[in-house]
């Protein structure tokens, strides 16, 4: 077990290191997210009440769209330099690679979300301070589910010709439960109501996370073959 | 006559019987009128679609367990038919909805989850269309087929709650009353007919896939 965790950790550490050293893509992703917020505002106008009413939806749309750009990236990088072959030589249970990649994706998405929430508070003039703990719980649950499907489908589409189109086409319908649950629970959190009000949704998100995680661990072996 | 041909004629005969039952035997529904007869297409279509998606799961697991391409052919054929029958479900429901609810589309829970399901399996077919190497296509499609099937209950509950929490009192009326026996009989006849048609098309599609593979090899 500890060797399994060690392998997953090695993958996670490597990916975060690569992201830190090659800042370009992470920075580009960050600016993409910021631009999205800007566009949402331009498209919807500056009416604060309206923006606040749709804020949970906007927040998660920004996360999902950023995920579309970001989640497949970690595997494409492996493809480009034939690192894939080396990765496949890892002894033992290769689903550890999935866990490591998933962890890296969760960390990267989480960093993006922190920036997103801060910018939303700044640009849209919404006071979020009181809602932060609840928001953190919801975002953690939603991010894990989104990242789990995204990591699996990202690995799957990385070697395919039509990757840019296929990845969204597979990911977007599959993550619908995460989006619905996360938006509803975020609405509860932002309204300042206790999270207990959103308990069914949190339960659904947790269940979805578990299912996607288990599916990823079980099927990743088949994705990794050449 | 081959077994497949016989199955085809059986399906055709069953469809004729089903049509007769839907228009001749079943009475005109008191409240909705003749529009209700769309149900004899709608309900069998959605039941068949669920059977199809179940077979996609069976074929996907079967392929990953055995690596025999006939399981993949089963999954592929079932997915195409599942998308077809889901499409029929949505289209017939929409045609029924216009005179009954006054709108082609509403974000009703079952409508929405059926639409999501449709998109999930269209994605599956698109994946198959772009991955050309047969072994890899089968392997990747199997993974997506398994994820898609596991997602069905999660999608179902999420969409159901999404509607329930946004709109507590549904406009769709009271609890469905018990179905009158003639209507239930006509429904059963059409369900049998659709299942036979599905089985026939499935065998045909699998045979075509086998020929395609032989041709490519």
Image (tube, rainbow, N blue to C red):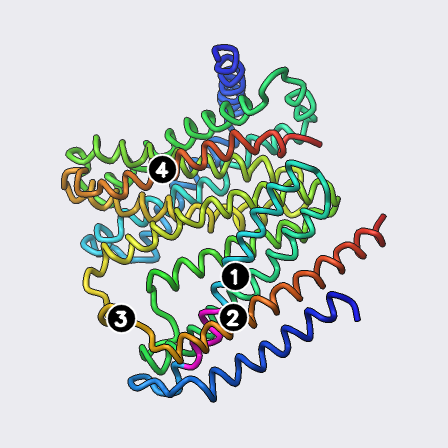
Near mark 1 (Cα within 10 A), the count class, few <14, some 14-19 or many ≥20, is: many
Which residue, given by chain and number where applicable, does mark 2 sit on?
A: B88
Q: Residue at x 64, y 37 (%)?
A: B64
Q: Chain of mark 2?
A: B
In front of the other: B45 or B115:
B45
Q: Distance between the Cα atoms at labels 3 and 2? A: 21 Å
Q: Position of residue A200 (x, y in %)?
A: 25, 43
Chain under callout 3: B
Marks 3,4: beta carbons within 8 A:
no
> Label 3 vs label 4: CA separation?
29 Å
- On the same chain, marks 3 and 2? The answer is yes
Q: Secondary structure at mark 4?
A: helix
The label on residue B49 is: 1
Q: How far apart, in angstroms, are the residues tagged by discs 2 and 4?
A: 31 Å
Q: Is residue A47 above or below residue A19?
A: below
* The C terminus of chain A - image quarter: top right
Q: Tell me the subunit letter for badge 1.
A: B
Label 4 sits on residue: A207
Q: Which mark is residue B172?
A: 3
Mark 3 or 1, closer to the camera: 1
Residues rendered magenta in the picture: B37-44
x and y percentages locating residue B130 in the rendered image: 68, 50
């Amino acid at each position: 077990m500890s060797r399994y965790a060690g392998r997953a950790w090695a993958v996670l550490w490597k990916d975060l290191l690569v992201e830190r050293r090659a800042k370009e893509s992470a920075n580009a992703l960050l600016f993409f997210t910021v631009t999205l917020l800007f566009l949402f505002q331009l498209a919807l106008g500056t009416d604060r009440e309206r923006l606040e009413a749709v804020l949970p939806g906007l927040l998660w749309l920004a996360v999902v769209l950023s995920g579309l750009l970001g989640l497949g990236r970690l595997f494409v990088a492996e493809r480009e330099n034939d690192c894939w072959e080396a990765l496949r030589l890892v002894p033992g249970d290769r689903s550890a690679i999935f866990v490591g990649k998933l962890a890296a994706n969760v960390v990267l998405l989480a960093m993006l979300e922190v920036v997103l929430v801060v910018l939303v508070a700044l640009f849209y003039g919404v006071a979020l301070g009181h809602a932060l703990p609840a928001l953190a719980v919801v975002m953690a649950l939603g991010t894990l589910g989104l990242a789990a499907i995204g990591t699996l489908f990202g690995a799957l589409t990385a070697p395919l010709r039509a990757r840019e189109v296929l990845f969204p086409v597979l990911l977007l319908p599959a993550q619908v439960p995460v989006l619905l649950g996360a938006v509803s629970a975020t609405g509860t959190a932002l309204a300042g109501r206790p999270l207990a009000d959103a308990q069914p949704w949190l339960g659904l998100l947790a269940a979805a996370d578990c299912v996607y995680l288990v599916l990823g661990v079980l099927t990743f072996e088949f994705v990794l073959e050449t | 006559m081959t077994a497949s041909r016989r199955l085809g004629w059986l399906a055709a005969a069953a469809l004729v019987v089903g049509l007769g039952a839907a228009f001749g035997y079943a009475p005109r529904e008191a409240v909705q009128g003749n529009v209700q007869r769309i149900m004899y297409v709608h309900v069998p279509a959605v039941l068949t679609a669920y059977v199809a998606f179940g077979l996609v799961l069976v074929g996907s697991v079967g392929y990953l367990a055995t690596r025999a391409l006939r399981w993949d052919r089963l999954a592929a054929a079932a997915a195409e038919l599942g998308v077809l029958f889901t499409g029929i479900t949505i289209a017939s429901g929409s045609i029924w909805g216009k005179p009954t609810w006054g709108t082609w589309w509403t974000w009703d829970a079952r409508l929405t989850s059926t639409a999501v399901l449709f998109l999930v399996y269209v994605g599956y077919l698109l994946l198959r269309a772009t991955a050309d190497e047969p072994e890899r296509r089968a392997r990747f499609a199997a993974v997506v087929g398994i994820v898609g099937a596991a997602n069905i209950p999660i999608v179902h509950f999420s969409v159901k709650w999404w509607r329930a929490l946004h709109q507590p009192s549904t406009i769709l009326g009271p609890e469905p009353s018990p179905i009158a026996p003639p209507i239930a009989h006509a429904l059963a006849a059409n369900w049998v007919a659709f299942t036979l048609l599905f089985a026939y098309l499935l065998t045909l599609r699998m045979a075509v896939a086998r020929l395609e593979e032989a041709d490519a090899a």
